[in-house]
Image: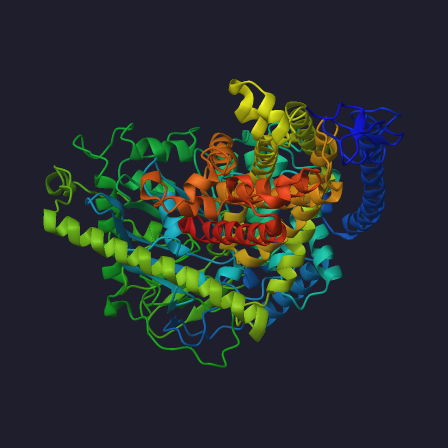
Amino acid sequence: MYCCPGYYCSEDTKTLTLCPQNQYCPTGSVGGGTSCLWLASCPEGSSSASKFGLVIFVIVLIIGSCIVFWIHRRFEAVRTHHLEKRLRWIHNHNINHDNKLLDDNDESDSSKNLGASTTELTTKESVIEIESCGKQGDADTDADAAENQASKKNKWNKVSQTFDIEFEHLGLTLSNGTPILRDVSGVLRSGRTCAIMGPSGSGKTTLISMLTSKIPKDEGKIRINGLEEELSHYRKLTGFVPQEDIMMRELTVHDVLLHSAYMRLPSDLSRAAMTEKVLEIIDFLGLNHVMDSVVGDAERRGISGGQRKRVNIGMELVTDPSILFLDEPTSGLDSSTSGDVCKLLRSVARRKGLTIAAVIHSPSPVAFDQFDDLLLLGHGGRVVFHGPRTEAPAYFGAIGFPVPEGASPSDFYMDVISNNVKSRITKKFKPFYLARYWESYCKRAQTFYANAEIGVDYKHPSPHATAPNTPRFNPRTSGLLSYPNLNSSAVSVQQGTGGLSESMAMTAINNMSSLALPSSSSSTLHPPAQAHHFNRHIHHKTVTLSPDSIHQKSTPSSPRASMAFSDFNSMYSSPPLPEKLTFMETVQKSIRIFIIESRMWWKGVLSETWETIEGLFLRRKDPIRNTANPFMMFWLCLNRARLQIYRNQRQFMYDQLLHLGCGLFISIAASRFDYLGRQHDLICAMTPFQLKYSCSSPTDHLTEVGVFIALGVCFAGISVGSMTFGNEKIVYWREKSSGLLTFPYYLAKVIADIPRIVLAGIMFSLSLIIFFHQRSNYFYLLFIIIMLYAVAFAMGYLLSALIPQNRVALVGTGFTLAWAIVFSGDAPDLADVMSTDASSGYAAARWLWVISAPRYAIEAIYLREIQARPWQEIHNEPLSHTYSLGEFWWCFKAMTAIMFGWHVLAFFSLKLKDRNKQK
């Protein structure tokens, strides 16, 4: 028999006393009642505390959170007001700010600055200089004056370093022999935009990935400004705009661009200078009116698709890159918006001297006309055409595919590659002929320019040469005849003695001599730096360049009738046979690919680790560009994570309601769970045989309470924690490829979640004790719950790093059930699991209970609650589940160690998984 509820009995069980006010006496109370919790009501004779006053406290806490959010918004509004004033000043003082996207009619004005946009070869390059005997003084003076005047009107400065990217004979073949790219050669020039087009599967994106060293190449060379090296060496000067608009959707346009600038601009720039650059980019992109608008996603409406695409490009422009690659920047946009985006790219290339290449799929005629150069890839990854865009119609007309009047050139080229257009040269045309046509043309062009009878002298330039407008032939640049146009209207070659006009070559070379040539022995003509007439006379020839030779707006001349490919009818009547590999060749190639990928994987991991160590301890400077060090990265990522979490008031409140709901449901389920000690031996001697076991054994349900608490905390914690990285993994991959270090990023996200963890523990524990009658000190229970939340969040981090976001909820549910129930120590009983008896069958899996944080949380809750009970056997006899009263703090230490273990696993999973997407 137990003391009645609402009363407490004396130690000798002879006196029964009514429970006093401000105390409550549950069944079996001895020696006095239990103090009533604050904000609870306990009238005289209470058997339980009425804790509905806690609801008022929770409401006050929510109202306080809303006030904090309101104050934060007010501070943000003041900051935004100052930024908008500064942006208006920039907008009003920028010349031509109403027409940042230059029209075709205005292109001639911007061409006065083209000299600084084009690349000047270093003195290390072998060139052909055409000596000048004409007078250039007046023309140079006028051009310099025009350039100075234009620079005053335009605040945009040229990039500090320009790049010409040349590649020759690039190839990539899968282990099964399927070619992705074959013999691809070309050049990307500074100050120009190049469109990369081709049908699906032609290797467009693979080419960009190969140029940026994201994937290894099987063969070929890549030269940067004439020197053979990897473009990854200039990673901090290279921007890549992915096809998807990858950015933090919870942030505003200004926040997104500002974070990108702080992370990747030179660290010696002041914060004010970086902010100024961001505002200039916002004004240039035409995003003034949406600067403080949230980017938004499918659930939360934000800016439009075209504006989001501009923000996507702006994330790279604010970093002041020298090279910019874009993967289908016009996808998902209407024709007008895609045209504006391409005009923007052309304007950036002209004004800042960037090297821009974009993979384009089905561009509109307006968008297509904004590109300077064109690289067409056919099936099998072969080059079909490479050169100035305006020369493509002449070339395709020469090989039997004239562009119909009024047709879209880009669509027509795609139809030709897809064999949807009939050839006017041969009825036996096959799509693979296109690559053979281009190869034949390049070989003929190579033969012509390598001919010594032409009389062009090869020599190195003077290291002190001061004439940037000298046209140069560079034999090292992969045999690519560079731009601008050298058609019959722009170039004529005359005999030095008779002055008679001579045709520049075989076939249509005189009409298309500006096309790319994939030979390593022929020449490259670099364009002059300024747009004006000049005449240069040498002993052998006279070369005359018209203004159309500088800019793309020239009209290509018609190909000569001598352009014939009838010989291809017999040469290529059948397509090339696919490469057939034997079994051993396939194995060898697979092993080779595995070794190359493994070497790149380890190189990336070790280089990032060394970069982190250098930034943390050695403070060494980067020879390319010094950007934010690991400490600054941590601070920037922490500030951004704070904005993500605490700016979205609705999501924040949803999270708190989740924790309140979980705690309330567990409280209701555990409302009648308690511990009642065993009866006295005299009482048990008088009970029926069937009740003797219940009489002599305590009624213990405290372990089930711990299991319910662990289940609710793990479910809520994993659900919220898995969203920390799961929703932004692709953003992390993008920033990682641009130099973000994993350690400061991960640490910042974890620390930003600490207030959420603490608040979650408070909400859960407050709702838990509404119906659950805990006897121990409330703060012990709160600390246990907060620690378990910290472990659950770490579990969520691991799952979000390993599991795709659309599956993490299901996996998280199974994860919760496994750790909170199976490995809790309740069922199966921890005593059976830890038994040394071989028949128990748990020996191999015993370590899972050792590293189970819910098991230690349940034990800690059990120990604190049972110590608050008055039963003697608690102190005199062994406890259930092998628990011991002195192990409470050991449970805390074990949970802390396990939490760090989950964090280590989550960190390395985030760092090492999907390395190919982090390049």
- Colour style of the rendered protein structure: rainbow
Q: Residue at x 37, y 61 (%)?
A: 602
Q: Nearer the viewer, residue 415 or 841?
A: 841
Q: Is residue 477 left or right of residue 447?
A: right
Q: Position of residue 866 (x, y in %)?
A: 65, 39
Q: Is residue 139 left or right of residue 839?
A: right
Q: Nearer the viewer, residue 342 or 60?
A: 60
Q: Position of residue 831 (x, y in %)?
A: 46, 41
Quadrant (top left, top right, bottom left, bottom right) of the N terminus: top right
Q: Is residue 517 left or right of residue 148?
A: left
Q: Quadrant of residue 564?
A: top left
Q: Position of residue 676 (x, y in %)?
A: 65, 30
Across the whole image, how many numbered discs are drawn on residues?
A: 0
Q: Residue at x 23, y 56 (%)?
A: 592
Q: Residue at x 19, y 33 (%)?
A: 429
Q: Position of residue 731 (x, y in %)?
A: 55, 45
Q: Nearer the viewer, residue 191 or 569?
A: 191
Q: Is residue 384 left or right of residue 25?
A: left
Q: Nearer the viewer, residue 199 or 187?
A: 199
**Residue 743 visible in the picture:** yes
* Above/below status of 517 relative to 174: below
* Above/below status of 716 relative to 919: above
**Residue 107 visible in the picture:** no
